[in-house]
Image: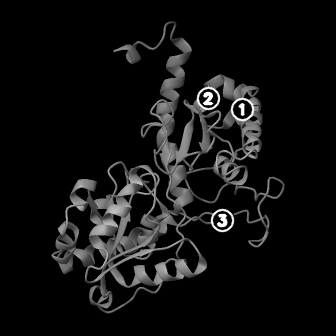
């Protein structure tokens, strides 16, 4: 495996980005240098980083830098014969921030997008059938020595949440949950910002809790869900529109609990359900979390079954549909009649 590239402490730039291993002994993805041999084209434009770097507050004049980068990348793609050949259908573009590529995103509606969820993306741009849902990078460290003799009894807190309670859109449920849960016995519902101290507090809180609450944020998902998974704290998901990564391989009902907004906002409902949850069932979910947590680790070089490997596996399963659409588009002489039905 090719491990050549900058050391971890060096910032990664366009000039020193590590080379992708040509073949790491896995079946999911092999990089080829001949574009004629490629099944798909990965476009390494980090649109979320561009948004966060250039005018994050949306009205700053610096957003012009983000717009110019988008114009430049689309100009490059439009001049590529491989983009022209497929209309971008076989091009893979990371777009995990809800405001990423916001100026020209409609030009990507045929491409395979790597998204965190579908918040703020119109259906004309992004769909579950076309795109790939990626996990957030977890913020807390993975709980590698979770070996308590009785993990259920060792976790004294019933339900834990720490984070911002003032959010937009679906995330307004957080403030309403705070009114219901704050001060409840065996519940820790704490406000916090992502500082070093807060991350340490979240790590301790998740590792000492049976259940970890995951309400929607500004969009349906957040890193909190994946923090809970790698902490082996059974996630309690309150998010009506959430979509999850790798769900064709992982049955999240075997390691998580799901409640609608309306259910969770009934006073006493969540606490009653969690207090009565059978210990043996919780232990089963805890074991399942330990078994799947490696799927949510981002590493370089990637390892078999980690998040990067799983994402390439998802892409491989999208490719037959891409080829079907591409081949049909070559022979159609009228607009696709299926879309008019």
Left or right? Give the position of 224 relative to 182. Answer: right
Q: Residues within 10 Å of mark 3 (few under 14, many from 20)?
A: few
Question: Who's the residue at 65% across and 23% down the image?
Answer: 85
Sequence-wise, which precedes: disc 1 or disc 2?
A: 1
Which dot marks residue 107? 2
The residue identified by callout 1 is: 74
Q: Nearer the viewer, residue 208 or 266?
A: 266
Which quadrant does the C terminus fall into?
A: top left
- Badge 1 element: helix
Left or right? Give the position of 220 relative to 104. Answer: left
Q: Nearer the viewer, residue 179 or 271?
A: 179
User: Disc 2 and disc 3: Cα gap in Å?
Assistant: 31 Å
Q: Is residue 217 visible?
A: yes
Question: Who's the residue at 21% across and 73% down the image?
Answer: 271
The mark tally for this picture is: 3
- Badge 3 element: loop
Question: Who's the residue at 78% across and 71% down the image?
Answer: 7
Sequence-wise, which precedes: disc 2 or disc 3?
A: 2
Q: Are marks 1 and 2 in contact (CB under 8 Å)?
A: yes
Q: Residues within 10 Å of mark 1 (few under 14, many from 20)?
A: some
């Amino acid at each position: 495996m090719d491990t050549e590239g900058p050391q971890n402490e060096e910032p990664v730039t366009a000039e020193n980005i590590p080379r992708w291993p040509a073949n790491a002994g896995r079946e999911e993805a092999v990089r080829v240098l001949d574009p004629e041999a490629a099944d798909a084209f990965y476009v390494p434009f980090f649109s979320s980083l561009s948004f966060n770097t250039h005018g994050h507050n949306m009205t700053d004049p610096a957003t012009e830098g983000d717009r110019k980068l988008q114009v430049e990348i689309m100009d490059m793609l439009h001049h590529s014969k491989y983009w022209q050949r497929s209309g971008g259908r076989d091009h893979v573009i990371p777009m995990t921030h809800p405001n990423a590529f916001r100026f020209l995103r409609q030009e990507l509606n045929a491409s395979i997008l790597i998204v965190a969820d579908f918040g703020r993306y119109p259906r004309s741009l992004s769909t579950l059938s076309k795109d790939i849902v990626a996990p957030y990078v977890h913020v807390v460290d993975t709980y590698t020595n979770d070996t308590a003799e009785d993990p259920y009894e060792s976790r004294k807190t019933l339900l834990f949440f720490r984070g911002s309670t003032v959010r937009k859109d679906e995330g307004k449920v957080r403030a309403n949950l705070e009114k219901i849960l704050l001060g409840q016995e065996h519940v820790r519902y704490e406000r916090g910002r992502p500082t070093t101290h807060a991350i340490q507090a979240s790590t301790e809180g998740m590792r000492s809790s049976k259940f970890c609450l995951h309400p929607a944020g500004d969009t349906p998902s957040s890193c909190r869900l994946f923090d809970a998974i790698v902490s082996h704290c059974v996630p309690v998901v309150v998010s009506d529109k959430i979509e999850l990564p790798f769900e064709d391989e992982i049955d999240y009902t075997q390691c998580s609990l799901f409640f609608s907004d309306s259910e969770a906002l009934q006073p006493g409902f969540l606490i009653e359900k969690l207090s009565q949850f059978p210990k043996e069932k919780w232990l089963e979910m805890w074991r399942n979390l330990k078994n799947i947590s490696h799927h949510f680790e981002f590493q370089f070089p990637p390892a078999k079954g980690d998040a990067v490997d799983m994402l390439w596996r998802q892409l491989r399963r999208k490719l037959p549909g891409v080829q079907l659409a591409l081949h049909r588009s070559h022979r159609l002489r009228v607009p696709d009649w299926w879309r008019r039905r």
